[in-house]
Image (tube, rainbow, N blue to C red):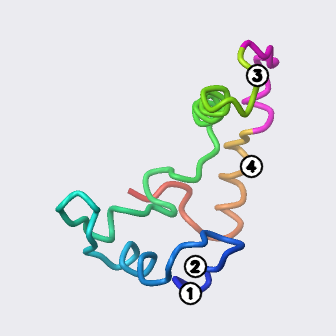
Amino acid sequence: MAHLLSRPEYLNVPERVIAASLTGPFDNGRGGTVSGPDFLQFHRDGANDPTPAKAAWLIDGLVRHHLLPAGLALPPELAAQTFRSDLYHQACHHAHLPATVS
């Protein structure tokens, strides 16, 4: 997995860095180490659940980094229409995966 993710079209990060972040512990660059299991979350604690709160966070970041114009009037229902938690939960159910893993 680390080899695949390290490719330029994905993360473009050295394979050893990705492998360490997956398995841990690894140097955090600040004189300490971080354990692998808690550094990257692919599914735990609703990490993938597309909630309206996550949509708002994303839009805020896009505005803050000038990728969307400040003051852009977005329809209030946009987040609920595009970040569909109901579809996510249906997909998890059909794939026999828990929607949230704690």
Q: Residues within 10 Å of mark 1 (few under 14, many from 20)?
A: few
Q: Residues within 10 Å of mark 4 (few under 14, many from 20)?
A: few
Secondary element under disc 1, as helix, strand or loop, is: helix
Q: Is the residue 1 above or below the residue 9 in the image?
A: below
- What residue is pinned by disc 3? 69
Of the image marks 3 and 1, the number of the one nearer the N terminus? 1
**CA–CA distance in space, label 4 to label 2:** 30 Å
- What residue is pinned by disc 2? 6
**CA–CA distance in space, label 4 to label 1:** 31 Å
The magenta stretch is 71-82
Secondary element under disc 4, as helix, strand or loop, is: helix
Q: Residue at 76% of width from left, 22% of height from top?
A: 69
Of the image marks 4 and 2, the number of the one nearer the N terminus? 2
Q: Give residue 68's position: percent from left, percent from top.
A: 75, 28
- Nearest to the eye among marks 4 and 2: give it: 2
Q: Residue at 80% of width from left, 14% of height from top?
A: 73
Q: Is the residue 55 above or below the residue 10 in the image?
A: above
Number of numbered callouts drawn: 4
Of the image marks 4 and 3, the number of the one nearer the N terminus? 3
**CA–CA distance in space, label 1 to label 2:** 5 Å
Residue 3, label in figure: 1
Quadrant occupied by the C terminus: bottom left
Most distant residue in the left direction? 31
- Nearest to the eye among marks 4 and 1: give it: 1
